[in-house]
Image: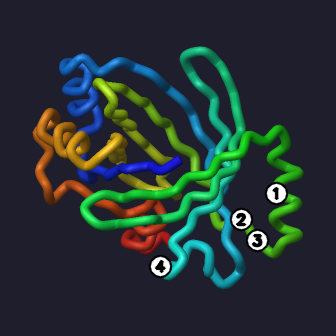
Amino acid sequence: MNEIEIKVLGIDKDGIEEKIKSLGGELIKDEYQINTVYDDEDGNISSSKVNTYLRIRETKNLIDGVQKTVFTLKTLISNQDVRTSEEIDVKIDSKENLDRILNFLGLKRKYIGKKHRVSYMIDDIKFDLDEWDSKTYPEPYLEIEANDIKELNRALKLLEIEEDMVSTKSITELRRDKGME
């Protein structure tokens, strides 16, 4: 599956959430996540050359209590205007066993990040309000995902978001910018 997304940095989380609700945003998810990110010892997987992301994501939906664990390989396809990535997900039933396999293959845990994500839909546009633990990323941001650039631009206009707040960087790149990598 390909993802087309942008991040909006420097947001007033409560204010933007109220705006999304006022525009008819439908709450589709309120979840707690634990994201375990992997790389080799030299950082080759997440390097700017390869720009790939390996993670195990454990989620607990705070609305219905459903829990799931997914292993993801996310590879950057394009970073021009929007971030387009190929995302391959596999549901797993044992994080511990997958962790052992990845370690055996020479991959190590890079970090474990915890985040609260609240998601809304307006038409076919998904709005994710993300707030990480302070050790992973210290500021909340909005992630907007749509089927094409036209819809992303419509989302920015709906929310009256300034262009200088938009980023196509991954969480790894944002962490590097903050000196956290």
**Dot 4 lies on which element?**
loop
**Dot 2 lies on which element?**
strand
Q: Amino acid at mark 3?
A: Leu
Bin the neighbour count of mark 3 within 10 Å (Cα to Cα): few under 14, some 14-19, many 20 and up: many
Say if mark 1 contacts mark 4, CB within 8 Å. Answer: no
Determine whether, in the image, residue 97 is placed left or right of residue 148.
Answer: right
Q: State the image quarter where residue 179 is shown.
A: bottom left
Q: Nearer the viewer, mark 4 or mark 2?
A: 4
Residue at image coords 42%, 42%: 130
Bin the neighbour count of mark 2 within 10 Å (Cα to Cα): few under 14, some 14-19, many 20 and up: some
Q: State the image quarter where residue 112 is shown.
A: bottom right
Could you tell me how far apart the alpha carbons at marks 1 and 2 are, in whole angstroms? Answer: 8 Å
**Dot 1 lies on which element?**
helix
Foreground of the two, 94 or 145: 145
Residue linked to disc 4? 48
Res 99 label: 1
Residue linked to disc 2? 109
Residue linked to disc 3? 107
User: In the rendered structure, which disc, 4 or 2, sits on the residue that comes first in sequence?
Assistant: 4
Q: In the rendered image of this protein, does residue 160 appear above or below residue 87?
A: above
Q: In the rendered image of this protein, does residue 178 appear above or below residue 90?
A: below
Q: Nearer the viewer, mark 1 or mark 4?
A: 4
Could you tell me how far apart the alpha carbons at marks 1 and 4 are, in whole angstroms? Answer: 24 Å
Foreground of the two, 95 or 51: 51
Q: Amino acid at mark 2?
A: Arg
Say if mark 1 contacts mark 2, CB within 8 Å. Answer: yes
